[in-house]
Image (cartoon, rainbow, N blue to C red):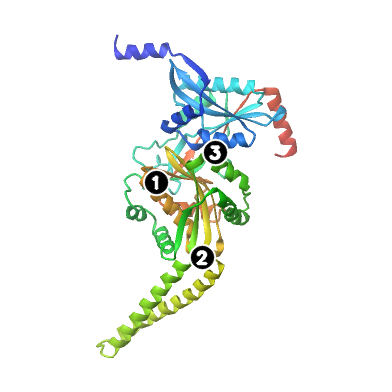
Amino acid sequence: MTNIEASAAKRATRTFTCSDITPDEMDAFSATHPQGNFQQASGMGRVRQANGVAVSYLGFYENGELVAATQFEVHGHGLGTFAEVHDGPLADFHDRELTSYVFSQLRARAKAAGAAQLVVTPEKPYRTRSSAGEPLDAEGASLAGVPAGVETGPDDEGIASITSCGLAHEGFPVGYQAVPRWRYLKDLTGLTDDKALLASYSKNTKRNVRIAHDNGVVVRRIGRDELGLFHDICELSCEKQGFENKPVSYFEQIYDAMGDAAEFNVAFIDTAEHLAIWEKKRDAFAADIAKLEKSLETARTPEKVERKLADVRKKHEAALRRIETAHEYETVGAHIPAAAALFIWHPRECVYLFSGSDATYAKFYAATAIQHHVMGECIERGCTRYNFYGINGVFDDPNDPGRGLLEFKQGFEGYVEELMGYFEMPVRPAVYAAKRLAHKLLGR
């Protein structure tokens, strides 16, 4: 029998089965799958269970080999029950036979749980784009920052495979969503130290990292007893941007459920260090002034020395003003919290999930310092995929409300993944139709 005949025979005798798997088995599969992510891992499953969601883990086998898996959720109760798969299932959607089997089993599970519909948001890029949002398959698109060998898309085949199973695709919207369809990422491949990492950023972001470092900003991982502080910093940004903050209890659930995989960081201004830095600069400028004043006595070109002297005197005066402000900061506290961010570690990537900052200390660039710090951790751990997570997908409107966040992330010189998006399948058609009608009448 030839290899071609053997492959054909194998396809003809494909046998699929589905069964529950353990959380550990789910984590092991997610760790190595090309679509593996923290939403499809047991830590997030425990968080959801703590919030009243029924969570189970399903494995899909072909001839006894685990080839697909998913975390399966059932939300609500009564007529409001629905099933959901966040950033999954983890499967090869180009394999139509496997995809058909997976969704037939998910539909059966959802129906058995009394769900009216099944909602799915696959962790599969539809299209990879440049940092500026250009499709990589478009002529002239910049490949800077994009990993070698990445699939460019568009993945119409994958979408067709899923919709052939009876799921409706919502299309390709822009805007922020609960499960972000637009992601900003940075490839850290080949970056081996802090110097190389810093060199990979845009000019302004390099400068901001240095400003933070040169002004006494320090980043520290906080413990569970400090999550109230984390919440309060996030609240400052939520108020400004019109988002709803998560309660402290939610962050405690993440801390408890995910253990070391959840890293809560706060960037503080070390006020004593900040003062010492500027006192040292003041003294250096004073010494330069003394030297220039002395050289002026014998200078052949006094105009040149006078220009230098004027410049250094301005810097000395600025340092004095900074020292005055630094003394005011000391009255606030020894360590002033200026920014905070939560990161989730997964074997495939590090994800930047929640954050906040105090606009009072915006010129310290503490938020930038946190990002640089954690990317440095990625390099130490050998993690090459840094996921800045959600953006809204609007790249051509300088007045868009999400512009500031986009430009902040773009400063780190990455690329964009546009995911497939949202799919929905009716499981109990009559109930599903009634729910849609009710939502329409209520304007939801």
Q: Earlier in the sequence, mark 2 or mark 3?
A: 3
- Residue position marked by numbered label 1 in the rendering: 378
Q: How many marks?
A: 3
Residue found at the far top of this picture: 1
Density class for disc 3 (Cα within 10 Å; few <14, some 14-19, many ≥20) is many
Question: What residue do we see at 42% from left, 37% from top?
Answer: 347
| Amino acid of disc 3 | Ala
**Residue 325, percent across and down?**
51, 73
Density class for disc 1 (Cα within 10 Å; few <14, some 14-19, many ≥20) is many
| Amino acid of disc 1 | Cys
Horizontal side of residue 356 vs 381, given as left or right: right
| Amino acid of disc 2 | Ala
Residue sitting nearer the eye, 243 or 61: 61
Query: Is disc 3 placed on a helix, strand or loop?
Result: helix
- Residue position marked by numbered label 2 in the rendering: 334
Question: What residue do we see at 49% from left, 65% from top?
Answer: 363
Quarter residue 44 falls in: top right
Do the CB atoms of the residues marked 3 and 1 lie less than 8 Å apart? Answer: no
